[in-house]
Image (cartoon, rainbow, N blue to C red):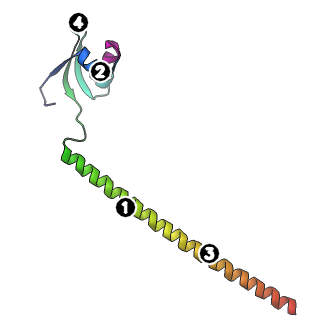
Amino acid sequence: MASGSTKTFSYSTLCEELQLGSHRELEDLVIAACDAGMLAAQLDPASELVRITMCMGRDVRDSAELEQIGATLTQWLLNIESAQAQLHDAAATEAQVLAAQGDDQATGAAEEASVDSRH
């Protein structure tokens, strides 16, 4: 919404679009949004109108920006999957090393027992 412009909406239109059950719910929502700094508005209960003079902008302005966000998230997902695969490979390698060390230790212990039994 451009600075200095005012948009006026009827209570009934906003209630329908926001799927609110009553004018009271709409008024509570507008007041909460104003308190949070997301909206600057005036309620006119007698005329059942809401005059909005400022609203917080959305993060996404157009489809090109949305596509860029999608591409960034896709790349992030690919990076996560790559890191996950690397961690899996490292864990498998570590498990093989530990298993080999365990086999070596078991073989060494058996050889020691054999030597001890001969003496």
Name the amino acid type tagged 3. Leu
- Helix or strand or loop: what does disc 4 sit on? loop
Residue at the disc numbered 3: 98
Residue at the disc numbered 4: 46
Name the amino acid type tagged 4. Ala
- Helix or strand or loop: what does disc 2 sit on? helix
Distance Cα–Cα, label 1 vs label 3: 28 Å
Mark 2 or mark 1, whichever is nearer to me? 1
Q: Nearer the viewer, residue 70 or 98?
A: 70
Q: Nearer the viewer, residue 92 or 105?
A: 92
Graded by Cα atoms within 10 Å as few (under 14), some (14 to 19) or many (20 or more), the crowding at tag 4 reads: few
**Mark seen at residue 15:** none
Q: Position of residue 79 (x, y in %)?
A: 37, 61
Q: Residue furthest top?
A: 46
Q: Main secondary structure of the magenta part?
A: helix
Residue at the disc numbered 1: 79
Residue at the disc numbered 2: 30
Distance Cα–Cα, label 2 vs label 1: 42 Å
Q: Residue at x 28, y 28 (%)?
A: 37
- Magenta residues, start to end: 21-29
Circles 1 and 4 in contact, beta carbons < 8 Å: no
Q: Residue at x 40, y 59 (%)?
A: 80
Name the amino acid type tagged 2. Val
Name the amino acid type tagged 1. Asn
Question: Which of pointers 1 and 4 lies earlier in the amino acid sequence?
Answer: 4
Q: Position of residue 24 (x, y in %)?
A: 34, 13
Mark 3 or mark 2, whichever is nearer to me? 3
Counting labels gives: 4
Graded by Cα atoms within 10 Å as few (under 14), some (14 to 19) or many (20 or more), the crowding at tag 2 reads: many
Q: Residue 87 vs residue 8: left or right? A: right
